[in-house]
Amino acid sequence: MQDLKELILLLNQHNIHPLKHLAGSEDSKLLALYEGISKGKFHTDEEAAASLYGGKGGASGYRKLKSDLRERLLEHVFQINTDQSHYSDYQKAYYDCHKQWVLVRFLTGQNANTVALTLATRLLRISEKFDFILLCMDIASYLRIQYGLRESNDKRFREANQQFEYFRKVYDAECLAEELYTTLVVRTVNNRSAQAEVHQLAKEYFERIQPAMEQYHTYKLHMYGYMIGLMYYTSVNDYKEAIRYCDKAITFFKARPYEARVPLQIFYYQHLTCNIQLRQFEEGKESAQQCIKLMQEGTFNWFKYRERYLHLLLHTRRYDEAAGVLQETLEHARFEFLPDNTTEIWRIYESYIYYLGRAGKMEIPTKNKFKLAKFISDLWIFNKDKSGMNIAVIIIKWLTLLQERQYGKVLDEVEATEQYCYRHLRGDNTKRSYYFLKMLLQIPMGQFDRSAVEPKAARFLEKLQTYPLQLANQTYEIEILPYENLWELALESLEKPAVSKGQR
């Protein structure tokens, strides 16, 4: 049902109602299914089938109904008006050029070759201006066939053939850059601890793609190429060099003859991330402001930007704003269509926001009903990331149990946490997490008495402070709030019951 939900949401956002001609029809199951999904009545196929067919052998009928609705919806996608102010010139050109290319192929199939050839020639110029290299290659291939086989124009054939060969070389370079970058991302997206390996691979991959970047100056090649180069620095948390590299990429894309929103978003976003890690919060706010100007609400990059902006708010103790960003994000219509690894990150943030609310640092939204056990059981990606995001999960579990004064359950966690520290947190890139968990382990050793706990934890706190966040070789997502701040909250939970503002 997710594909139908997404199509209906897309058409609704553009005020397109594909079944309005069926309004008032009696017993129209197609309209009933559409409206049931559109109005949030049906969330699953089981709910829809039960409502429309009453569970009486309607499985095959429901499958056909879904298929019919999908086809009706897809027929209306091309009605979306992309000539609107919120689309950049690059986006408008992308949609228009690809529609024009479909028209060229259709006209050719209808034997209207003269008008198709004229349209294709003009289309190639526009596509080249906007770096639509794959489309350029297809058009050049079409032109050489037309000039070589249909018109027998040797000069035009050779020109089109030379263009095709050039675009093919550029396209091969773009494909290589895309492959290399994707290979790096796949190694890190569900495992935030694979940094040393990524650092070496990023160096090797950038050396492979750099000659092509010097020869060809296209959008896709440089976007992936610069991201590979950036990963060389971010994989070892060299944030100062990463910022300089972002500036270099931003300069390149600002110089394009069109507004390259996506790569500019990417590198301003990385600029923001680096400034957060360097504790340069004012510079981070400036990066965030530049980034938001380029964002289209509901896109994947928009969600990733909000994720990093939430991180900035938490690290500057703007907790009420952070809670607002979280709630708006979780309630967004497109949240459910995000990849699982992205939604899990947001659920981890939610657990920390809820913890802060219970500590009285902000209002807890009444609709938030966070349950620790369900949160832990629902994670299936990052609970395997032993030297990465699973650290944040273990920490919030400890902090929540301490806040709720479930000391028996805290004691049950001690041995497993000690083993975890020994097995997974001995490397240089997890020093801060290692020392912070060792600090938490002193709490049960001090019988949950703050006066006894603080002296026991003092040596680990001192070691933690010798690894400031901006210098620690640690994946930035792990430390959702600075450990120094979390330690203050952990100690506060030992001296008074947890009370939220909403409960006073």
Image (cartoon, rainbow, N blue to C red):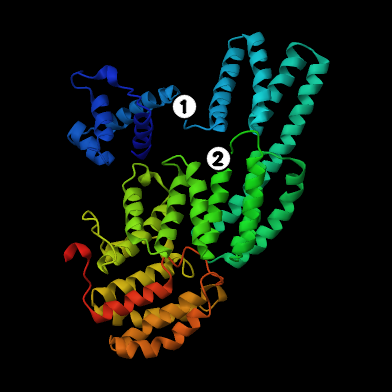
396 lies left or right of 482: left
Whether 219 is drawn above or below 312: the answer is above
Tell me the quarter of the image containing the C terminus: bottom left
In the displayed structure, would residue 488 be above or below residue 111?
below
Is residue 198 visible in this depiction of the protein? no
Q: Residue at x 76, y 23 (%)?
A: 160
User: In the rendered image, which residue does mark 2 sit on?
Assistant: 261
Q: Amino acid at mark 2?
A: Arg
Residue 52 point in image, percent of width and height: 20, 31
Q: Earlier in the sequence, mark 1 or mark 2?
A: 1
Residue 220, given in percent of the width and then of the height, sits at 63, 41
Of the numbered discs in the image, which one, if any, rests on residue 84?
A: 1
Q: At which x and y percent is residue 107?
A: 59, 13
* Picture quarter with the N terminus: top left
Count of marks overlaid on the render: 2
Rate crowding at label 1 as few (under 14), some (14 to 19) or many (20 or more) other CA atoms within 10 Å.
Answer: few
Q: Are marks 1 and 2 in contact (CB under 8 Å)?
A: no
Dot 2 falls on a residue whose secondary structure is: helix
- Whether residue 225 is visible: yes
Q: Nearer the viewer, residue 248 or 428?
A: 248
> Which residue: 56% across, 72% down?
471
Image quadrant in which you'd find residue 162: top right
CA separation in Å, label 1 and label 2: 16 Å
Residue 73 x/y as whole percent: 37, 26
Q: How busy is the neighbourhood of tag 2: few (under 14 within 10 Å), some, or many (20 plus)? A: many
Of 112 and 314, nearer the camera is 314
Residue shown at 27%/41% (left/top)? 43
